[in-house]
Image (cartoon, coloured by chain):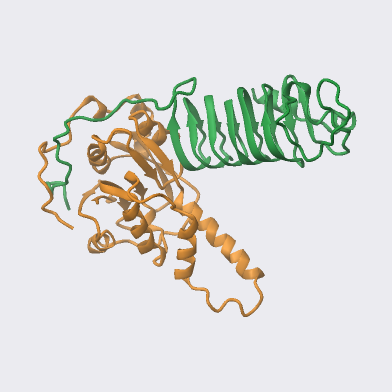
Amino acid sequence: MWNKSAEAKPSPQAADTSVPVIPAPVANAQQTQPVSTPTTPPVAQVPPPVSVPTASASNGTTTIAAGLKISGEISGSSDLYIDGETQGKVRLPNARVTVGPNGRVQADIEAREIIIEGTVQGNLKAGERLHLGAASRVQGSVLTPRFAIEDGARLRGKVEMVRIGGSQSASSVGTTADPSKAKAMSASGKDE
Amino acid sequence: MSWQAKPRLISTPAPDSRAKPGPAAVAVSSANARVSNGLKEFLWLLSDSTQGRILDLGQVSQATLTFFIEKGFRVSTEDLLRAWKEFLAAEEENFRKAPVGDHENVSPAMFADKFLASDLQYPAEHFHGVLAWDIFDYLDAQLLPKVMDRLYTMLRPGGAVLSLFHSKTPERFCRYRIADPQTIELLPASTLSVHARVFQNREILDIFGKFRSSKTFVGRDQVREGLFLK
């Protein structure tokens, strides 16, 4: 999984070959990207070549490389690796979104699987699982059926579990019991 | 604060299966684990809150999150000490950059107000329980009473705060997580904040003065666990 993400990172050579900023599988009318200007489009919009490493796709994963900033909504079905800056909304309900160590995202993210190693300010909604790496910083609410949080991860927000598939609220191992139970503390022998 | 609180119909926490140490407890190093009567009582107090809301003011921990989520709670986390430290660092940076003469009105109380203007922002009476761990031992004197006021506002009537107080300056800074319904695991961590004070029992009761009742437990390690009910 991690190797795959690493493979997806564009090398400088890859950038020089003018890889499309937005690859065909992700091409979507809702996508916006500041660096792209409309050209006479074939099937998918192919923006003009850019001179710096931007976004690329390999093995079905689109990469937003470090140094690139994208604003707007990203949607589609391809996996996405973000190591640059992203603002807006990321909606890939059937794909995996990875925010790399250099990634800074100010957006709500909805995906099948979300892996965070960088910084995210926004709500996270994972259809299957969420992983927060040791260096991750997340500010926002989290909705996921399964999650893994490494020691050192920082999360500021609300965490709720959903069933796989998205239906709200989950695990209800529930609590409770005798409603007549009076909830008050008494000064028992354990008190100081 | 009333020590003559309403009598409990069940004199001790119900010894149900949930209170028994699970497999997780086996993995906990006994050196870093402490049996917590405060946690047991805290869970008992929350036990009739379905879909209750918990606020964890310590470092986010998968074990703690899972523990409460599996019981049907919604958990919010906010690492208050780290947030405060980062806030102070940012303010210090701004202070250094500010022109000479702009520093006259700076005061610790102002910092506390500014910090709370952006942090610990939750609706009133939102939470059923707050896990404060030992953060009160580390908070600045100016910030502490304001945090207490905010926590009181955020708690629902009947809500509880679980907090730990050291009886002496701790040897090392630790973070905490729940291992099982009666065990808290201490996780030694790099020092995030300097231990500010050792509270006397009377001081503890004073800072929780608004709360309806309180109860403290002393562990073998002489750490006092306090449970405070709104």
Foreground pick, B193 / B67 = B67
Picture coordinates of residue B156 (x, y %)? Answer: 29, 47
Residue at coordinates 54% horizontally, 56% vertically from top-left? B86
Residue A50 location, quadrant: top right
Picture coordinates of residue B223 (x, y %)? Answer: 29, 50
Q: Say left or right for B10 vs A27.
A: left
Q: Which chain is green?
A: A
Report whether residue B177 is seen: yes
Residue at coordinates 81% horizontally, 39% vertically from top-left? A35
Foreground pick, B127 / B59 = B127
Residue B142 location, quadrant: bottom left
Report whether residue A7 is seen: no
Residue A77 location, quadrant: top right
Residue at coordinates 11% horizontally, 38% vertically from top-left? B11
Q: Say left or right for B57 vs B7.
A: right
Picture coordinates of residue A166 (x, y %)? Answer: 48, 23
Number of numbered discs on residues: 0
Residue at coordinates 47% horizontally, 42% vertically from top-left? A157
Foreground pick, B24 / A8 = A8
Whether A43 is drawn above or below A31: the answer is above
Q: Say left or right for B217 vs A76.
A: left
Q: Say left or right for A98 vs B181.
A: right
Colour chain B appears in = orange
Whether A1 is drawn above or below B118: the answer is above
Whether B14 is drawn above or below A167: the answer is below
Picture coordinates of residue A36 (x, y %)? Answer: 82, 36
Foreground pick, B125 / A5 = B125
Identify the image quadrant of the N terminus of chain A: top right
